[in-house]
Amino acid sequence: MFGYYLDLALHSLKRNKALTALMVLAIALGIGASMTTLTVLHVLSGDPLPGRSGTLYYPQVDPRDNSGIMPGKEPPLQLTEIDGFNLLHAKRADRQALMTGGSVPIQPDAAAIDPFYVEARYTTADFFAMFGAPFRYGRGWNAADDEAKARDVVIGSELNERLFGGANSVGRTLRMAGSLFRIVGVLGDWSPSPHFYDLNTGSYGYAEQVFIPLQTALDLHVDHNGSSDCWGNGTGGVGRIYPSASCVWMQFWVQLDTPAKAAEYKQFLIHYSEQQKELGRFVKAPNVRLRNVMQWLAYWQVVPDDVRLQAGLAFGFLLVCLVNTVGLMLAKFLRRAGELSVRRALGASRRALFAQLLVESGVVGLVGGVGGLLLALFGLWVVRHRPSDYAALAHLDPVMLLMTFLLALGASLLAGLLPAWRACQVTPALQLKSN
Amino acid sequence: MELRPILSTLQRHKTTAWLLILEIALTCAIVCNAVFMIGNRLQRIHMTTGIDEHALVQIQLAEIAPTPDIFARAREDLAVLRQVPGVQAVALTNQLPLGGSSSNASIKLDPAQREPTLSAGTYFGEDIPQTMGARLVAGRNLRPDETTNADIVVKALATGNTKGIPAVTVITQALADRLWPGQSPLGKTIYLTDQVGVRVVGVLADLVRANAYNDATAHYSVVLPLFMGAGKDQSYVIRTRPQDREAVLKAAVAALKKADPERVVTKQRTYDELREKFFENDRAMAGILIGVIVALLTVTALGIVGLASFWVGQRRRTIGVRRALGATRGDILRYFQTENFLLATFGIVLGMVLAYGINLFLMLHYELPRLPAIYFPVGALALWAIGQLAVLGPALRASRVPPVVATRAV
């Protein structure tokens, strides 16, 4: 039966070529625009560390006095250096890492390569294990190296490619910011997106190529990058002058394997705040937060407003395209009342007519969906060639591919439902008579 | 024109008519809001900065090895740059208007105040307004002898002995008007921390902030006579003749490299390029919005053509009868045009309500201002015009149906 309906549908669609083209084009445009924007939205609001993000938390405490630059109830977005080290040394979590961002000049041995700057992360040892950063060669440093201010460095695969042609460079030395470092590890391709652990340096398409122990970096006074917020007499740093004690400029991440541990850690933060208040460092009542990765990203509203607006626009457009198609299909089906009533008179049930018309709208949807998919691929290609920081991420993954098809088919069947239902209400005799 | 026959015909095609009305309404609502958003973006793109944009270039440098004395280094660089042919003025600044990354301070009028009054952009450097071409409208500019090196200030704040800190500032007119409406700001004091008050000695017509994302606070800036020294976040800003910009930029970079080859140039661009970069996303968004409007109007127009063609085909016999009974071709043409006008009007009325609703939603979620009433007629006119244009083809075809059709069996 399906084959026959398909035959009928193709016949009918061929009879009105311009109209069929219009319906297919409208669906394709609507689907194409929606899928492009939805894919971008999906990629940008994705989980940077699937499987791990649920157990990674970002503790916040509130060390400000009442003269804060950031009014409001939320604690600052980062930690002061003192609080950072206090929480790090307390070791209350399964893993913990204190960090901040920067950039360092690389001075290659080879005279052929000019010195250049790369983005850097100054962090304590647990960073790699906690975030599951994959090592191609060697490994990270340990907590003892942190305390010893070891001149160890882990480099990214891109830098390793640039300096050593991708060879195993573990054990070699690297001159940075006027000091010699020993390469202890080389990372594989790794750039969590969004750049959740420090969103001040840009949320997307940002991958550090150099990782140095935090204490080593502070000791050498290498350049700090990122945001610093101060209160009281605090002065935010510039370059090698670091922000002062009443400034927040460090990020601290902890791994807490069970919800019970997370609850316990939150209690610890409150206790810590109370203790600091007794010592006179904190002024306010304990004001702490403990968000996991996805909660942290949501709180930051990391997805740009424009991207959400574009998705909204695209769906508005799809809706108009659908209404357009429903109207056209309805007009078309109603015009064929004569033909349909003949089929009814010859014994076809309403259900049979309904199925026949749905097959016809399904064909339109399918062709429109394929067109929409091509348009979405083109749209994403355009997005990739725009100068935004998330451009490189705009790819269609299998999930979105499937979504496109379901959306196209669902949309066009939905569009066919009302016209098909209206059209198969014909009374056979009446239509035959009037003709 | 008699409306009743049109209405009673539409009654018989209720569902189709409603679908068309719905389509027009949705299009109208989205177009109204999209045009409004384009207007907003364009307004932002044309934001005035108060500086002599076409005469400026920016150079940013980063040292390879740590510099022992960043202040002496910056003084040397400034001297080198002044020697470059074509350079009219040069200054070291911590930020440029619309530069993106910014330095800001919260300002209080009274140190005892609990919450700061507002946040303003803080320009640190010597000769910044003069070099950038920001016009002084009252008082005086900061003097070179008032300049203090940043390390002294940092130390003073850390120890609490704030005597050595420069106590003068130049602020923008917009900030002065906001802090002391209707009064002269000259001689008044603002507090950047609880202990450091600075006296306003001059007022600039304008000097936009580096992070001018919010239109309301974009023009709140203060200039402080603080010398930051060489560093990768500092910029040399050079003033030259507009036609010399490229040549001066090249010569200046070469001169700096010659003075010390041990550094990397991280930024070298004209101010126009900097400005272009800042509004890149707004420009892209405006383009996308225009694309959406065109696509929407096209789809709607084609939809109207399609439906009207159907109706004309369906009513050939009726049209023939009307023609046979004496209706002119003009009558038939006007019939279809009026029908479309009626549908479009319904759609537009519904669309206005919808447009208002969408705007309310956007105001809630995207900090968009209220849709001004002027945008409603824009959407209405666009849809009436599109509707009439789209229906013209099918209507003309209808008017050419000969009366003799009436006598034929279909």
Image (tube, coloured by chain):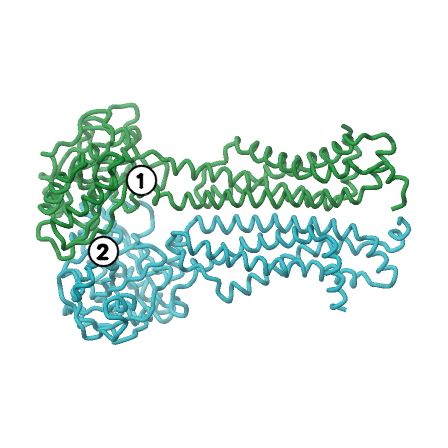
Chain colours: A cyan, B green
Q: Is residue B35 visible?
A: yes
* Residue sitting at x 78%, y 30%: B331
* Residue sitting at x 10%, y 44%: B76
Q: Is the Cβ of the residue at disc 1 closer than 8 Å to that at disc 2?
A: no
Q: Is residue A245 visible?
A: no
How many C-alpha atoms fall within 10 Å of the one at disc 1: few (<14), some, or many (≥20)? some
Q: Nearer the viewer, residue A341 or A14?
A: A14
How many C-alpha atoms fall within 10 Å of the one at disc 2: few (<14), some, or many (≥20)? many
Percent coordinates x, y for residue A415 in the rendering? 67, 54
* Residue sitting at x 80%, y 54%: A425
Q: Which chain letter goes with mark 2?
A: A
Q: Is residue B372 above or below residue A255?
A: above
For this view, does B38 lie left or right of residue B408?
Answer: left
Residue assigned mark 1: B272
Amino acid type, callout 1: Asp
For this view, does A232 lie left or right of residue A38?
Answer: left
Residue assigned mark 2: A80
Label 2 SS: loop
